[in-house]
Image (cartoon, rainbow, N blue to C red):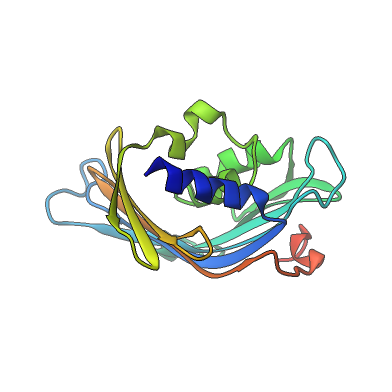
Amino acid sequence: MTEILESVFENYRALQSYSDSGTVAVEIESIGKKFSGEKKLLTGSVFATNFMRNALGSATEPHLFRYQFTSTGHFAELKEDNLNFICSNHEGVFKRSPEEGLSPCPSLALAVADTAALSFAGSYYIASLLMAGIVEGRQWFFNRLSDIELVNNTDQMHLRAKIKDGLVDLFIDAEQLIFSQMIVARPTSTAKFVWQDTVLNGEINTRVFDQYRF
């Protein structure tokens, strides 16, 4: 089944532009001593991605990219301002969080790393699918999948794989060869990613990459 995933990865890396919106729904079964047994904390985020390949003419950061997300559920209730984003454009690489505001970042890879935990790895997954250099190949999440099996081969192909501490279910649009859903189940948490309104190689207004566009 690795051939299917290789085709998906090659497809993402060949896209000249990409945009999406979607959701992450996370159930956390235990947090330290505060949550145990049947108690669950429900959280997640709503996100949007925009990407244009080789639009900047720079060898260091050649791509226009923006990943924006807002918290939902438990963490959204803790603060009024929930807007987070990272972006790369003609002026550099930037990140924005409610706590620190807008600030420059040395590289897009570092910006992705800084937001990985807060975005429940959403920024990491999509950025690393679209662009090389976000993470070292051997450490890439998708390279660490094992025992990959095909569960269902329909218009929405369903692959199941193991990771070190859990299971991953991948749902692939068979026509477009992109992920439509991904469920990462670990002992104390389950995260469900849903990618919607995905547009491949479409026109994107470059103003969406502006760091001052909130």
Q: Residue at x 60, y 43 (%)?
A: 112
Residue 199 lies, with reference to residue 166, above or below; the image says below
x, y percentage for residue 165? 27, 35
Identify the residue shown where x is 13% and y is 56%: 38
* Residue at the extreme left of the image, as rendered: 37
For this orientation, the residue located farthest to the bottom is: 197
173 over 139 or under it: above or below: below
- Residue at image x 49%, y 62%? 79
Q: Residue at x 74, y 35 (%)?
A: 106
Asked where in the image residue 124 lies, by quadrant, the reply is top right
Q: Quick one: quadrant of the N terminus?
A: top left
Residue 201, given in percent of the width and then of the height, sits at 69, 64
Quarter assignment of residue 82: bottom right
Q: Which residue occupies the foreground of this view, 22 or 34?
A: 22
- Left or right: 22 as drawn, with respect to 190: right
Q: Residue 62 location in percent, x, y?
A: 79, 44
Say left or right for 128 vs 60: left
Q: Is residue 61 above or below residue 151?
A: above
Q: Is residue 158 visible?
A: yes
Number of numbered discs overlaid on the protein picture: 0
Q: Is residue 42 left or right of residue 78?
A: left
Residue situated in front as seen by the camera: 193 or 45: 193
Q: Is residue 74 visible?
A: no
**Nearer to the camera, 116 or 196:** 196
Quadrant hosting residue 186: top left
Q: Position of residue 12 (x, y in %)?
A: 59, 51
Vertical order, 31 against 83 (above or below): above
Q: Quadrant of the C terminus?
A: bottom right
